[in-house]
Image (cartoon, helix red, strand yellow):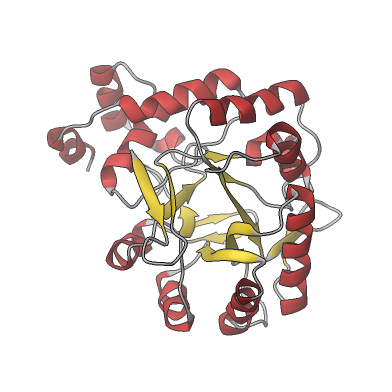
């Protein structure tokens, strides 16, 4: 199974339908070095050798931890590998999250990602919206598109966006991808300690209409504890875990969804990738709702 990013552009990117999100490779609270650095490097290498060619990262993971791990494990990169990073947020000394979205901040973020990932151009960058600061979306995206014209970015995406923000973004330029929280059990907006997270359900139809891959984040962390008995019943039918069924549900929900389940366990990585083999019937999907 594959999906194409920016399929109508001069530089489309075709990747496997299951990617890997690197956030969980960091220490506690998404900060600091991994508890088991050799395993973290092996996870990245195993993901790629298993057919994954889409990695999601950010320089504020760690800080810079996941970017440095990616470069150490995989550079020089395979030709078909797509590394997606994010800008627009930063971490305070107390490890809280804050907007970092002025044009000069976004440029600094891109330059830092280029340096730590050892790249001359980043294939895909998500503008992460966090909070409702004074910088208008048009000004933020304007800075992103300017760096795209300079060749620092190949494609621009949006992360953590409401339907209205995505509609505005589509009026301002070409949006290649959208990354929102989304899972079987968590489909709509949720309030977390660091702010509001719009759900994937409210933008999925827009993504489908415009041929924009929707990349769900946190699908295994926040969704499964309240998934309910229906998911449990289907796991028994397919002899699978709830995590695998959540990924399978996303894959069957729409051909425009690109899951990026993250883990700090090599065993769980292999388990997650097997979700691509699960075939949910129309009856299964109707039962799950």
Where residue 135 appears, x then y in whole percent? 66, 81
To which quarter of the image does residue 140 belong? bottom right
What residue sits 80% from the left and 35% below the top?
Answer: 33
Where residue 277 appears, x then y in whole percent? 32, 25
What residue sits 32% from the left and 41% below the top?
Answer: 251
On the rendered image, what quadrant is the N terminus found in? Answer: top left
Where residue 259 appears, x then y in whole percent? 43, 43
Q: Which residue occupies the foreground of this view, 176 or 240?
A: 176
Above-or-below relation of 113 to 222? below
Q: How many marks?
A: 0
Above-or-below relation of 56 to 162? above
Is 213 on the left or on the right of 108, as rendered?
left
Q: Residue furthest left?
A: 283
Q: Which residue occupies the foreground of this view, 12 or 50?
A: 12
On the rendered image, what quadrant is the C terminus found in? Answer: top left
Where residue 6 appears, x then y in whole percent? 42, 62
Above-or-below relation of 271 to 65? above
What residue sits 72% from the left and 77% below the top?
Answer: 102
Q: Which residue occupies the foreground of this view, 261 or 145?
A: 145
To which quarter of the image does residue 27 belong? top right
What residue sits 59% from the left and 67% below the top?
Answer: 129
Above-or-below relation of 141 to 282? below
Residue 273 in view of the camera: yes
Residue 264 in view of the camera: no
């Amino acid at each position: 199974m594959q999906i194409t990013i920016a399929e109508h552009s001069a530089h489309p990117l075709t990747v496997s339908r299951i990617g890997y999100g690197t956030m969980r490779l960091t220490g506690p609270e998404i900060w600091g070095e991994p508890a088991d650095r050799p395993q973290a490097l092996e996870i990245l290498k195993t993901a790629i050798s298993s057919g994954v060619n889409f990695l999601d990262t950010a320089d504020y993971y760690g800080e810079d931890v996941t970017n440095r791990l990616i470069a150490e494990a995989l550079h020089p990169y395979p030709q078909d590998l797509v590394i997606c990073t994010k800008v627009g947020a930063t971490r305070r000394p107390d490890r809280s999250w804050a907007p970092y979205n002025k044009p000069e901040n976004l440029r600094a973020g891109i330059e830092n990602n280029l340096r730590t990932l050892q790249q001359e151009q980043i294939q895909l960058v998500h503008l992460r919206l966090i909070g409702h600061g004074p910088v208008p979306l048009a000004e933020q995206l304007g800075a992103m598109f300017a760096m795209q014209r300079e060749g620092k970015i190949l494609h621009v995406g949006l992360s953590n966006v409401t339907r209205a923000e995505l509609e505005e973004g589509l009026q301002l330029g070409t949006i290649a991808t959208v990354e929102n929280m989304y899972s079987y059990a968590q489909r709509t907006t949720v309030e977390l300690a660091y702010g509001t997270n719009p759900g994937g359900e409210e933008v999925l139809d827009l993504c489908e209409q415009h041929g924009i891959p929707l990349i769900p984040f946190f699908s295994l962390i926040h969704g499964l504890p309240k998934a309910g008995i229906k998911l449990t019943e289907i796991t028994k039918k397919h002899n699978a875990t709830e995590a695998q069924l959540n990924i399978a549900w996303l894959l069957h929900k729409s051909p425009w969804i690109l899951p990026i389940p993250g883990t700090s366990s090599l065993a769980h990585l292999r388990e997650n990738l097997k979700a691509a083999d699960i075939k949910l019937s129309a009856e299964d999907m109707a039962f799950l709702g």
